[in-house]
Image (spheres, grey):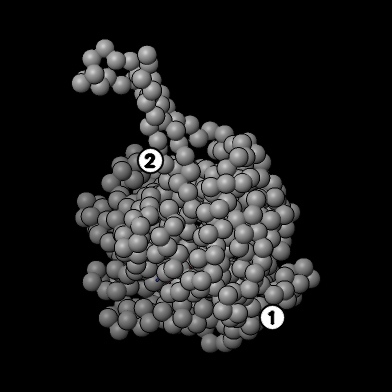
Amino acid sequence: MFLTSAAPSCLSKTQAFLDREHKLLIDGEWVSAQSGKMFEVKNPATGEVISSVAEGDAADINSAVAAARRAFEGGEWPSLTASQRGKLLWKLADLLEENLAEFAELESLDNGKPRAVAAAADVPLAVDLFRYMAGWTTKIEGTTIPISVPYMPGAEFHSYTLREPVGVVGQIIPWNFPLLMAAWKLGPALATGCTVVLKVAEETPLTALRLGELIREAGFPNGVVNIITGFGETAGAALAAHPDVDKVAFTGSTEVGKLIVKAAGESNLKKVTLELGGKSPNIILPDADLAAAIPGAANAIFFNHGQCCCAGSRLFVHKSQFDEVIDGVSKQAAAIQVGPGMHPDCQMGPMVSQIQQDRVCSYLDSGLKQGAEAVVGGKRVNGGGYFVEPTVLVNTQPNMQVIQEEIFGPVVAAIAYEDVEQLVSDANDSIYGLAAAVWTRDISKGHQIARRMRAGSVWVNCYNVFDAALPFGGYKQSGWGREMGYEAINLYTETKAVTVQLQ
Ligand code: ADP
């Protein structure tokens, strides 16, 4: 269902932000790119240019890394107490919350997602993440360790560990949750006392730039957070390869993740964490409550237009219920109100860009050509923006691209199964391992399947449940390390073992 009535205009403060000239945040100042270049930001619902931002490249990355290094090694930031760091993070969360409506509009105009979803999920989750990480600042503890040292009989020691910030961190984020991905990355880095160069996605630079304004307002010392807008092949690649960056944290495609690892290896062996693609299985067992599982399966794939790395894109349904479930999910898909994210009734916006729309549609074409059938959807929505119909594919085969590869769009491939043993092995048959879900009334079975899934997150009788306290990340080619929770704190620290010989 496509919304045809016009979307309302945005708040005057949102418009004022769009109209401002957007520069790079380096060493606490907004500066132009050294090349002087700018690039346009488009509203994916219309294709219209809504703003323009500086095009940072390797030269600007160099300046930003130098600023981050200075801030890490001297001055105000390293001398702050843990509690003072926590207070700054909490203040940032408060400022973000105060500006929630503006952030939700910017996210909707820049990324395409429904404003209501950004206001209910993206922005509050980012606020909560900063508060959660503020709490960790005072709890990053080492341990005391009894040691024996067999070759020093009689000697006495006091050994303990310190957890220290890993240093200057390069963070490269994608366009699907622009503000939230910035928060997931910045939160643990700042809680642990690192300094950051953040390279935002070229498709969606706006909310991170607005966040940069709030970071200054909150009172973070200069150079602690530097924000570079620019392209992946130039700015992103320069950050991943920079010899003075201690860690790079990346979220994006598996293909680019491999380039990041290579760049890290060939430069200075910086630490790497990666949150990459997925092709997550969503399993409905025969005893499931279908009244919950059917809308759950629709939400698993259609939330954020399927532009979620953990989207439930392979739907496994028992043969005996296949028609009923597919009919239910297809009805849900057909009822989704697609339109500009700023429209108050919008439930699904456009793909983020023309490139993404073309990519999703080429997967649809390949699936249909290989014999899959679209029960609902299956093509782009012609009109101003980059819309794709919510799609349910059946008659899929294991060797099809639509089963094996991440589409990153509103396309679910349904698979009928007969045998639960075979089901587990088919569900795990993917190069990815980001998420999985199982729907069942038998909670023991739910736990058993959860254990057998080779995935970093498993949901039972729910999907897309995120919390700042829950670690998120992937098995296999879905990534290295975890975001959020204490796991993320760990990955932004080094462990130092100190041993004192007692006289
Ligand atoms: P997508 O293909 O969905 O846009 P990408 O993995 O290409 O996802 O992009 C995620 C982030 O990685 C973006 O910020 C992008 O600019 C950045 N990026 C893309 N290519 C490179 C690269 N070669 N090196 C470093 N970063 C990159």
Picture layout, residue 459 above or below residue 119: above
Residue 346 appears left or right of 474:
right
Residue occupying the point 29% across, 51% down = 454
Picture coordinates of residue 457, whole percent (x, y): 40, 49
Q: Dot 2 surroundings within 10 Å: few (below 14), some, or many (20 or more)?
A: few
Residue 396 appears left or right of 189:
left
The residue where tag 1 is placed is 5
Residue 152 appears left or right of 161:
left
- When asked about the image quadrant of residue 379, the answer is bottom left
Q: Quarter of the image for the N terminus: give it.
A: bottom right
Q: Quarter of the image for the C terminus: give it.
A: top left
Ligand 1 quadrant assignment = bottom left
Picture coordinates of residue 467, whole percent (x, y): 52, 47
Residue 487 appears left or right of 116:
left
Mark 1 near ligand 1 (CB under 8 Å)? no
Circle 2 — which element? helix
Q: Looking at the image, can residue 467 be seen?
A: no
The residue where tag 2 is placed is 443
Circle 1 — which element? loop
Q: Earlier in the sequence, mark 1 or mark 2?
A: 1
Picture coordinates of residue 255, whole percent (x, y): 34, 69
Which amino acid lies under the numbered mark 1 shown in the image of this protein? Answer: Ser
Picture coordinates of residue 153, whole percent (x, y): 23, 15
Residue occupying the point 66% across, 78% down = 51
- When asked about the image quadrant of residue 413, the answer is bottom left
Which amino acid lies under the numbered mark 2 shown in the image of this protein? Answer: Ile
Residue occupying the point 57% across, 87% down = 383
Q: Dot 1 surroundings within 10 Å: few (below 14), some, or many (20 or more)?
A: few
Toward the viewer: 247 or 67? 67
Q: Looking at the image, can residue 440 be seen?
A: yes
Residue occupying the point 61% across, 68% down = 24
